[in-house]
Amino acid sequence: MPEHVAGWPKFNLNAVASEQLLAIPGSGEKMLDEFRKYAPFSTIARFRGEIGKDIDPDAVAALEAYLYVPVAVNDADADTLRQLPGVTGEAAAKLAEGRPYADNAAFLKALEGVASPDLAAAAAAFLGA
């Protein structure tokens, strides 16, 4: 998140600690078990599908305000790309068209063409290795 934007930090679904999951509003021990049962998540759609088996779509959407699936810049689907700060559906399509990227730095450079520089910089935290 850019410095001037207040908000809850988003946690990487594949690296989040139990204490962090339990701190999310609406979460609990049962939800913690569900996260662990289905991890790791490769796309946000997989998260929605697996967790959505146990809770309603509105609750899944509420969880997404606190969580993200790490973005593999050359493989991520449009919905997973849209987790990045400032990335709209149109921007996700444009980024996908620019593949392959040599590395995350090249992707972030392309992201600056579709999102503001501060949002592009914040997106680095959402990228996978």
Image (cartoon, rainbow, N blue to C red):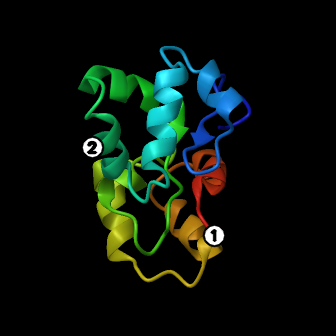
Q: Residue at x 59, y 60 (%)?
A: 127
- The three-letter amino acid code for the residue at tag 2 is Gly
Relative to residue 80, is residue 120 drawn left or right?
Answer: right
Which numbered tag is attached to residue 129? 1
The image quarter containing residue 56 is top left
Label 2 residue SS: helix
Relative to residue 39, is residue 123 drawn left or right?
Answer: right
Which numbered tag is attached to residue 49? 2
Q: Upstream in the sequence, badge 1 or badge 2?
A: 2
How many dots with numbers? 2
User: Whole-percent x and y of residue 10?
Assistant: 60, 36
Q: Residue at x 28, y 34 (%)?
A: 52
Tag 2: Cα neighbours inside 10 Å, few (<14), some, or many (≥20)? few
User: Whole-percent x and y of residue 108?
Assistant: 58, 65
Q: Are marks 1 and 2 in contact (CB under 8 Å)?
A: no
Q: CA distance from mark 1 to mark 2?
A: 24 Å
Relative to residue 6, is residue 62 drawn left or right?
Answer: left
**The C terminus lies in quadrant:** bottom right
Relative to residue 1, is residue 32 drawn left or right?
Answer: left
Q: Is residue 41 above or below residue 11?
A: below
Label 1 residue SS: loop
Nearest the viewer among 116 and 96 is 96
Nearest the viewer among 41 and 65 is 41
Tag 1: Cα neighbours inside 10 Å, few (<14), some, or many (≥20)? few
Nearest the viewer among 81 and 11 is 11
User: Whole-percent x and y of residue 121?
Assistant: 66, 53
* Callout in the foreground (1, 2): 2
User: Whole-percent x and y of residue 70?
Assistant: 54, 56
Q: Residue furthest top?
A: 26
Q: Residue at x 61, y 71 (%)?
A: 104
- The three-letter amino acid code for the residue at tag 1 is Ala
Q: Is residue 119 above or below residue 32?
A: below
